[in-house]
Image (tube, grey):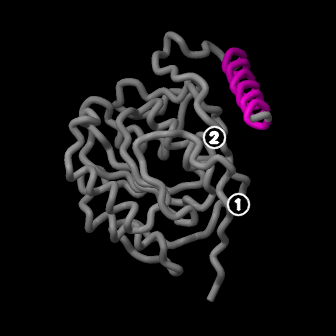
Amino acid sequence: MTEIRKSEPADGYPPEEGCYLRGNDYSPVAVVVILKWRREELPQSIEQLVRTGLESGAALAGTLQTENVGLEKVICNIVANPNIRYLIVCGPESPGHSVGDCIRALYEKGIDKNRRIIGTKAPAPYLFNIPRHWIDRFTEQTKLIDLVDEGTPETIKDAVWSCYQEKPTRFKNYELFDIGAYQGEPICGKITWKITNPAYAPKNEREQDALEKMQELIKNLRKKANGKN
């Protein structure tokens, strides 16, 4: 039997708070359930999908409401755990934010020089608040399992189970199995700003570099401050 390589998540994993549950840190899969309602109006069916993802063995399972800052938080938490190699996205599509379409476009086409996700119909698909290499790492580390508008508890359970298998297993149009941890150090960082409006975003690469350096400086200062406590 071939041993499946696993690694330790980063210290401080998962770095971003949000509406999710933490499960098995060595699981190869995370589950994102699209939320098109206000959180205080969360339907029981959506809560059930999140719970099913966790109970089936996901590393993280939670809801996602926005195509910008919300998605950035998902990226932050996943790249902090190299064991996560699949992202299941399920639940009914959000007509306002087009979250499912946005994630699909990110995997297929990436982002342009203005940090806009290419080819999506989402109204504000900008990833301004995290470094570009985190985004690249996210799409390189994980594979999308697209269950938008068709996710049921039984389907989620089957998808998570398939990701755990030692040998390639057919699930719908996917061939899934536990391929082991991503061979790279975990990236653990938090969102410093929460820019969603292009008018307030960096205008060129020089401004973007300055923003990223400032984010790194703030991260280091926080580490030093925590070390003194």
Nearest the viewer among 225 and 72 is 225
Visible residue check, residue 161: yes
Mark 1 Cα shell of 10 Å, populated few (<14), some (14-19), many (≥20):
few
Indicate which disc residue 134 carries: 2
Please state, as top left, top right, bottom left or bottom right, where the N terminus lies in the image. bottom right
Mark closest to the chain's N terminus, 2 or 1 = 2
Q: Amino acid type of disc 1?
A: Gln
For residue 122, side relative to residue 131 (left or right): left
Is residue 189 within the magenta segment?
no
Q: Is residue 43 above or below residue 51?
A: above
Please state, as top left, top right, bottom left or bottom right, where the C terminus lies in the image. top right
Query: Where residue 173 appears, x then y in whole percent?
Result: 36, 66
For residue 82, side relative to residue 109 (left or right): right
The answer to which image quadrant residue 190 occupies is top right
Residue extending farthest front: 229
For residue 16, side relative to residue 103 (left or right): right
Residue visible at 35% across and 43% down?
Answer: 100
SS at mark 2 in the image: helix
Span shown in magenta: 206-227
SS at mark 1 in the image: loop
Residue at image mark 1: 183
Residue visible at 54% across and 71% down?
Answer: 178
Residue visible at 32% across and 35% down?
Answer: 98
Query: Where residue 16 appears, x then y in whole percent?
Result: 54, 39
Q: Main secondary structure of the magenta part?
A: helix
Mark 2 Cα shell of 10 Å, populated few (<14), some (14-19), many (≥20):
some
Is residue 219 within the magenta segment?
yes
Q: Amino acid type of disc 2?
A: Trp
Residue visible at 72% across and 21% down?
Answer: 214
